[in-house]
Amino acid sequence: MFKKILIANRGEIACRVIKTAKKMGIQTVAVYSDADRNALHVKMADEAVHIGPPPANQSYIVIDRIMEAIRRTGAEAVHPGYGFLSENMKFAEALEKEGVVFIGPPSPAIEAMGDKITSKKLAQEAGVSTVPGYMGLIADADEAVNISKEIGFPVMIKASAGGGGKGMRIAWTEQEAREGFESSKNEAANSFGDDRIFIEKFVTQPRHIEIQVLADKHGNCVYLHERECSIQRRNQKVIEEAPSPFLDEATRRAMGEQACALAKAVGYTSAGTVEFIVDAQKNFYFLEMNTRLQVEHPVTELITGIDLVEQMIRVAGGEPLPFAQADLKIDGWAIESRLYAEDPYRNFLPSIGRLTRYRPPRETAAGPLQAADRWVPAHPGDHPPVAATGVRNDTGVYEGGEISMYYDPMIAKLCTWAPSREAAIEQMRLALDEFEVEGIGHNLPFLSAVMDHPKFVSGDISTAFIAEEYPEGFLGATLPDAEITRVAASAAAMHRVAEIRRARISGRLDNHERHVGEHWVVFVAGKEIPVRITADRQGSTVEIDGRKLRVESDWLPGQSLARLSVDGVALVMKVDRLPSGFRLRVRGADLKTYVRRPRAAELARLMPEKLPPDTSKFLLCPMPGLVVRINVAAGDEVQEGQALATVEAMKMENILRAEKRAVVKSVNAQPGESLKVDDVIIEFE
């Protein structure tokens, strides 16, 4: 086995690989750019080597810089993680020439499957069902429009060397095909150094389901069941789960066998993923094969008990797989929520800055992998031991660290495991409510809202879920009346604790609890809720509309997280103090909650409401980024939906469009200029 490996990546995946390597007794080498000098993966590794400036095309994807780091440290093998050089055939070949082992598939398999155009053709030749499309090279936007018209709208425009949602656009019209081709080409060139584009038919209402395969150098190949990845935004996965709530055993077996057959046809070894789209009739179509570890691999680990990173390392070292297909059962259910540095209230645009607070929920034993640590069956059909429920958080950041504009906005992958899907969802709800992130915009509220959405809960989902259920963007969750009542009762009980603390500090009266009083009015979510509070040593009883709710908690003033029990049901809320109340964040809702005495409540009703400033005459920069292009000039008349400017952030191009018909008064930004949030790009008359 290897004594030292280098991880040619950064962030949470680098940390993930380091954890397994340490468990195996293998020393690790990290690489880092200027922006990552103080990153978590650098701190975790045994050694670290600086490889250049922040942009990935000057550091992480420069093969010569990685090779020099290998020579300096004497690393025997390299794990590429995902993204960057993970599917770069030239990198694999460079390692081979250097005598360094690539912890991944052989370079011919990368060439065959890593290129989406080539992989489509090979899949067709192997008899795999594929989506109709044009696999040839596309010269320019005009040709892209013509091809799209021949295939029939809608179409998917994709980068041949793409991944992670980069270089992908859905086009419903000729104009969108033209714009999508240009943006996809630019993103592909910037992210992968390869701007080739292909176009295929976009299947409406599909599910995105992928099969995890694992193959060794001795001719063995198994599939580790499927992952459902249908909850996507801008073609990038947001929530994944394993297994899929949609597949039956026959379809699962057919997809798995087909995935293994394709892997064997190209001489594949190591971990890989065959992606399919599946229609409502369970017909499945090959999309692509990712010749690397997937971002969402933890959910597969949690239901199978297999450490995929460990198996990749062992396969690279020449060891055979220690299990056969019959050994791989599905134990329980796992869900992964991707925490992104993006603001859901600003159409999920990227957010950068310092993590002033970063407190993930406590990790607990989760599923067969965590219960068994490293499991190898003694006999065919043996099951790994299974924990009750659990939480896992794969991350690459820490409190006080910086979220940079140069890399992918993913902060962490929060996973939960339970014996059933319903229990895994409930565990995820509580874990999301416990996850504290401050200092940047993030999508925790949106993830919480999805966990409560009836369609997600029922498993009735497709890749169009976010577009259909949040057509105007995410505006915050609206809690049902029963949940508002629980929040109101909790806020009243917490306010009583805070008032008692204030009375003790001031020394106003000996009987602090009597001074606080029993009758209050809670203002929350547009409602006025009169309450009566009585208490004992174990908790409070809050009476609302004749109903008594028992609230128990050890929360104290100043704590940013409140864990409560309301009538025996858990409730977790993030807490910020406000005058006469709290800002409470729970289940995706952000609630300013005030607890007032009845007389103060009467006076509060008379206070005027403060209105936000009018910004309708400005196009404001919605996130920190670089201006790529300006499409208009002073004096131009623009129409609703017209492209005005393009801003690039975190490797994604964002086209800013006119919200209504207007005339441009002035243009205040130029291509190449770096902007902050709310900088004025264009002013209208």
Image (tube, rainbow, N blue to C red):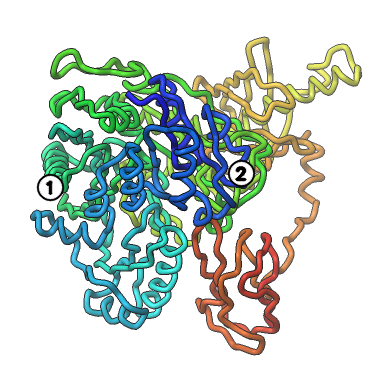
**Is 579 on the left-hand or right-hand side of 586?**
right
Picture quarter with the C terminus: bottom right
Looking at the rendered image, the disc whose residue lies closer to the viewer, 1 or 2, is: 1
Label 1 and label 2: CA atoms lie apart by 52 Å
- Residue with the mark numbered 2: 590
Say which quarter of the image contains residue 428: top left
Which residue lies at the image location 42% right of the left edge and 75% below the top edge? 179
Q: Nearer the viewer, residue 492 or 5?
A: 5
Q: Amino acid at mark 2?
A: Asp
Which of the two labelled residues, at mark 1 and mark 2, occupies the earlier sequence position? 1
Which residue lies at the image location 18% right of the left edge and 55% below the top edge? 285
- Residue with the mark numbered 1: 265
> Residue 250: x percent and y percent?
11, 39
Q: Amino acid at mark 1?
A: Ala
How would you rate the neighbour count of disc 1 (Cα within 10 Å): few for under 14, some for 14-19, many for 20 or more? few
> Residue 374: x percent and y percent?
32, 18
Residue lying farthest top?
A: 537
**Is 393 on the left-hand or right-hand side of 197?**
right
